[in-house]
Image (cartoon, rainbow, N blue to C red):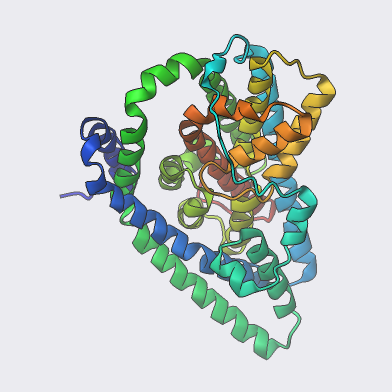
Amino acid sequence: MKKIKLHWQILIALALSVGYGYYFSDHVSYVSWMGDIFLRALQMIIAPLIFSSIVAGVLGLGSAQNLGRMSLKTFGYYVATSLVASVVGLFVVNLIRPGVGADLGLTEEGVVLEAGAASFFDTLMNIVPTNIFQALAETDMLSIIFFAILFGFFATQVGDKYRTSLEKGFNGVFEVMMRITMFVIRFAPLGIFGIVSGIVADQAHDLVNIFGRMGLYMLTVILALLIHAVVVLPLIVRFIGKASPVRHFRAMSVPLLTAFTTSSSSATLPLAMEAVEKNSGVSKKVASFVMPIGATINMCGTALYECVSVLFIAQAYGIELSFVQQLIVVLTALLASIGAAGIPMAGLVVITIILSVLGLPLEGIGLILAVERILDMFRTSVNIWSDTCGAVAIARTEGEQLKV
């Protein structure tokens, strides 16, 4: 009997979980534990995978010149795509204007968000860890990436004897972590069944009411995300990556489905790295440098969502934002998204920051809380899709031959 491919297993689990969560919502605790264990297993491997992959990647680049070139391409791509995504979001929300006449009765009293509303300057300061072991324990992505790049760079400066040993050692650790990742991936259908069953059980019975009140806002966000994911990013893959967007999309089916169900860029990172290397043909040197950085700073889907949400809240309160104010929304979303935790609902914290900058009522957060979890699934998928498209494009500019 022919084995069912993993992405089909995940789709079947997704369909079954919707039915189970809706009809057996009182018994969802019997299966939700599978989702919890799956997420914990993914989170367990994030820190050692990121650290070993970046150190191995930097050592593989060899010289400071190569590291500088790769860094410039990586950060340039992520800033450019996030900026374009924000502009796409502004265009669509100004065209549809979903906030005009929206039901303000959705505002909720006592909404408290862990704003950790650190300023952009604080975020930059916190990149330098006071204790790297604490950063690893807390999965502080920016600090881990900073130290890993620093460690990898100076490892290239030591004598050949030590450098060779370090390169072999970190490549070995990276290979072990990828083996563990492959083991965890085998349980993705069960994990996704548990996760989605819980989500459906919590929200399914309110879906009709939610769609009735917030349908136009949801459609605006999803349409803007689709334009960015189906038009902008494939153009980059086609003309810069010289690859087929359709073939690349098929190669990324497992990480994209996982991103959609978990709503976590960080949790999906191990699966995305494995798929980019094995399915799309991106070298370990490029994937191990580009992908971990992307999971932390490339939040183009989140930046788009934040722009649409802030303008929606302003429209709902009857506040017209000028061109300059909308430009501030774009720039604040871009800066605040850098380092935004790759965890579910982190976008709400950034929206709080933007509302504060513009002097808009923070109670507006209550308008979008009802559909935040649903939209989080879509924008996380776009974030991961953008990361993989960037890896393909950068790999091609490095002269690599891809499978897609």
Residue at position x 42%, y 45% from top? 258
Quick one: 165 or 154, which is closer to the camera?
Answer: 154
Locate residue 45, reporting x and y percent.
Answer: 46, 65
Report which quarter residue 162 is drawn in: bottom right
| Quadrant of residue 285 within the rendered picture | bottom right
Return the residue nearer the eye: 17 or 112. 112
349 sits to left or right of 32: right
Q: What residue do we see at 64% from left, 39% from top?
A: 300
User: In the image, residue 168 lies at what x, y percent?
Assistant: 56, 81
Q: Which residue is farthest top?
A: 101
In the image, farthest residue toward the front: 110
Q: Is residue 241 left or right of residue 277?
A: right
- List x then y, in percent, for residue 63: 76, 71
Q: Residue furthest left?
A: 1
Q: Nearer the viewer, residue 173 or 16?
A: 16
x 34%, y 50%: residue: 35
Residue at the spot x=54%, y=36% of the render? 379
Q: How many marks?
A: 0
Up-down: is 290 above or below 209?
A: below
Residue 236 in view here = no
Seen from the viewer's position, the closer of residues 19 and 388 is: 19
- Residue 252 location (% of width, % of height): 46, 45
Does residue 404 appear anywhere in the picture? yes
Is 81 located above or below residue 181 in the figure? above
**Farthest bottom residue in view:** 161
The relative height of residue 66 versus residue 156 in the rendered view (above or below) is above
